[in-house]
Amino acid sequence: MIGSSIYLRDRAAFTGGSPQAVYEELWQRGRKGRLRTRAILAAATLILCGLLVNAVFGIVMAVLVASADTFVHWRVHHASSVWRRGLRGEERMNRVLRHTLERRGYRVLYERVVPGHGPADELVIGPGGVWLVHNEAWHPDAEISHHGGRLFIDGRTQSKLVDGLTARADAAAERISRVAEVPVKVTPVLAVHGGHLVRTPFAADGIVFAPPLRLIRWMSRNPSADHSPDEVEAIARAAVRALPIGGRLTPPAAGITAA
């Protein structure tokens, strides 16, 4: 198209029409309003605490109130960063897993593929079980809730998402079990980046939903199996061979037949 960039594709995110771009623009427009509100809160705190106690106490409390307001707004903006960049959150979840479960002896496989069912963002293998982690980022104002055991995003069911994730976990379990020659259960979970969760963590459609750190805490505290260290290693080796990277299967070792 005439006038379009030869370096960037014609994507709404680059032309200002995407929800991410609109949200960022509105955030910038609201900066003066946030600063004005923060100043009013700090001034009111300074006057009130200064009259009730003394000037020094008033200044300290005003600084604390202003800092708290800054932190709250930073958290809101930071929570939407993945969504604003048009990402799903895999990189953030990868970093969190490397600094938490992997340091505690869990094995994590990244960016694997379940043939016929799509990508597995992370496969976590530990003493308490095996989890297939999927990542999704929603608009900061999106309401993520559950009713009657079903998932709702802004009041709409998400059958395609949950059915696809459940089928992916089941297929991964079948392939890993075939290579490992022992039954292996794979539990699907979803890491939520952004959005507003009415309650967290929560289970809907057989899948647990939570922000990354709370999801990791849930996996640690809710085992679905009891694997020894040797079993963890054996399952991890089987998963490496059963689930390819980029669509290619790892050649099986002697005596092992890849599924």
Image (cartoon, rainbow, N blue to C red):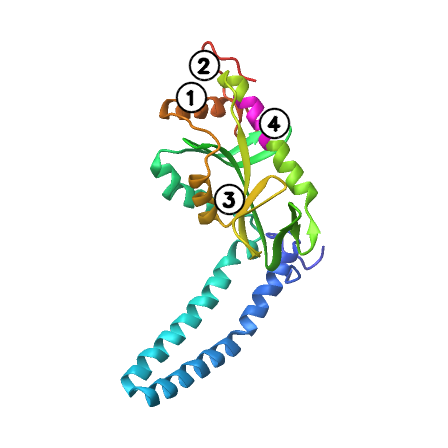
At label 3, the amino acid type is Glu
Decide which of tag 1 and tag 4 comes sooner along the chain. 4
Q: Secondary structure at mark 2?
A: loop
Q: Residues within 10 Å of mark 3 (few under 14, many from 20)?
A: many
From mark 1 to mark 4, how far is it between C-alphas? Answer: 21 Å
Label 1 vs label 4, nearer the camera: 1
Tag on residue 115? 4
Residue annotated with mark 2: 253
Decide which of tag 2 and tag 1 comes sooner along the chain. 1
**x%, y% of residue 212?**
47, 48
Circles 3 and 1: CB atoms closer than 8 Å: no
Circles 1 and 4: CB atoms closer than 8 Å: no
Q: Residue at position x 41%, y 81% from top?
A: 42
Residue annotated with mark 1: 234
Give above or below for 229 relative to 97.
above
Residue annotated with mark 3: 90
